[in-house]
């Protein structure tokens, strides 16, 4: 299809330590179209986080091509990345010595794109956008709940209005209510900001609540990338174990009644 936001072709990722080679990705292909919320699922250690980091240009694959918004991911570079791609890291810790607002404005300050006053204003807008009040602005990260920390980290990821947002297990570690709230927030941001989202998640509620497509990582590649209904019906041991357990059945029952992300 024309104009994908992410296009990965024949990707290999091999880590070598001493004499042992471990092949994490092997001839992996993945396409993410504009406007999708693509969820990436796979067992632990299958290379989901590495794949997100490669999309962000933070890691270079052993072989293969990753094109993000029409350019090689490597060209995003560390400094330019925030403009085009926002990333919510799994352990996306905030800087503990900075206030909430300083954390959100950090990419702006680092790139010196705006004078201090304006970057403060921009950060306030994002704070509101993630559902937090102005009274949170001058708090320190240690004063925040887990759910609030995720929201602040999300505000930081979105500070430059990137068209692509990468989320690494955004609701893991949150209590069910906070996870639910975070999901609702992501859903409305996706709609309002015309974002394309790539999200790694193990959480079936999050998965079915948000995904327009699900890509499954197994056997070092993406074995299927399709709408949720097609993916759950796909015959593969990982998919059966992942979706057809008790929790999976419950989440799928919800899927039938869900209006979908839009
Ligand atoms: N920089 C690295 N050097 C060596 N091995 C790595 C490196 N980064 C990740 N790995 C290995 O690659 C595999 C995939 O890691 P990761 O992407 O973190 O998995 P997950 O799918 O759980 O997010 C793991 O076995 C991990 O140990
Ligand atoms: Mg991971």
Image (cartoon, rainbow, N blue to C red):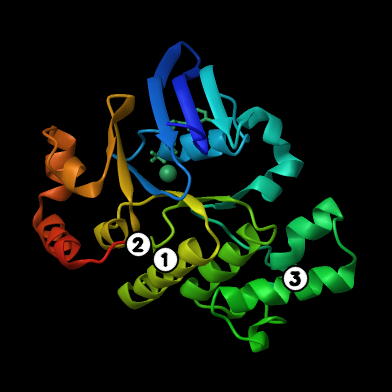
Pick out the residue farthest to the front: 2
* Residue 15 horizontal/vertical position (percent): 48, 21
Mark-to-mark CA distance, 3 and 1: 22 Å
Classed neighbour count for the residue bearing mark 1: other residues with Cα under 10 Å, few (<14), some (14–19), many (≥20): some
Could you tell me if the residues under marks 2 and 1 are in contact, i.e. CB atoms within 8 Å? yes
The front one of 93 and 244 is: 244
Left or right, 62 with reference to 183:
right
**Residue 155 at least partly seen:** yes
In the structure shown, which secondary structural element does the residue marked by tag 3 occupy? helix
In the structure shown, which secondary structural element does the residue marked by tag 2 occupy? loop
* Residue 140 horizontal/vertical position (percent): 67, 77
Label located before the other in sequence (2 or 1): 1
The answer to whether residue 124 is above or below residue 258 is below
**Residue 97 at least partly seen:** no
Left or right, 200 with reference to 133:
left
Quarter of image, ligand 2: top left
* Residue 164 horizontal/vertical position (percent): 56, 48
Could you tell me if the residues under marks 3 and 1 are in contact, i.e. CB atoms within 8 Å? no
* Residue 195 horizontal/vertical position (percent): 52, 55
Mark-to-mark CA distance, 2 and 1: 6 Å
Which residue is disc 2 drawn over? 261
The front one of 72 and 169 is: 72
């Amino acid at each position: 299809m024309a104009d994908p936001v992410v296009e990965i072709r024949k990707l290999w990722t091999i880590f070598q330590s001493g004499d042992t080679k471990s092949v994490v990705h092997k001839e992996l292909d993945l396409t993410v179209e504009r406007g999708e919320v693509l969820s990436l699922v796979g067992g632990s250690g299958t290379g989901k986080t590495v794949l997100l980091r490669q999309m962000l240009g933070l890691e270079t694959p052993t072989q293969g091509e990753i094109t993000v918004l029409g350019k090689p991911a490597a060209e995003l570079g560390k400094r330019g990345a925030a403009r085009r791609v926002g990333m919510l890291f799994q352990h996306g810790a905030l800087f503990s010595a900075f206030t909430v607002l300083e954390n959100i404005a950090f990419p702006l300050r680092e790139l010196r794109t705006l004078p201090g006053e304006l970057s403060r204003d921009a950060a306030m807008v994002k704070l509101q956008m993630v559902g937090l009040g102005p009274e949170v602005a001058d708090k320190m990260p240690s004063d925040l709940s887990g759910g609030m920390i995720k929201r602040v980290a999300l505000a930081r990821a979105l500070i430059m209005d990137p068209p692509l947002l990468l989320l690494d297990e955004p609701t893991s570690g949150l209590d069910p209510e906070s996870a639910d709230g975070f999901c609702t927030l992501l859903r409305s941001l996706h709609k309002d900001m015309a974002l394309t989202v790539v999200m790694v998640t193990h959480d079936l509620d999050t998965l079915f609540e948000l995904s327009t497509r699900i890509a499954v990582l197994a056997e070092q590649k993406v074995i299927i990338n399709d709408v949720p209904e097609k993916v759950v019906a796909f015959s593969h041991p990982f998919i059966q174990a992942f979706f057809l357990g008790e929790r999976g059945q419950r989440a799928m029952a919800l899927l039938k009644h869900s209006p979908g992300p839009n």
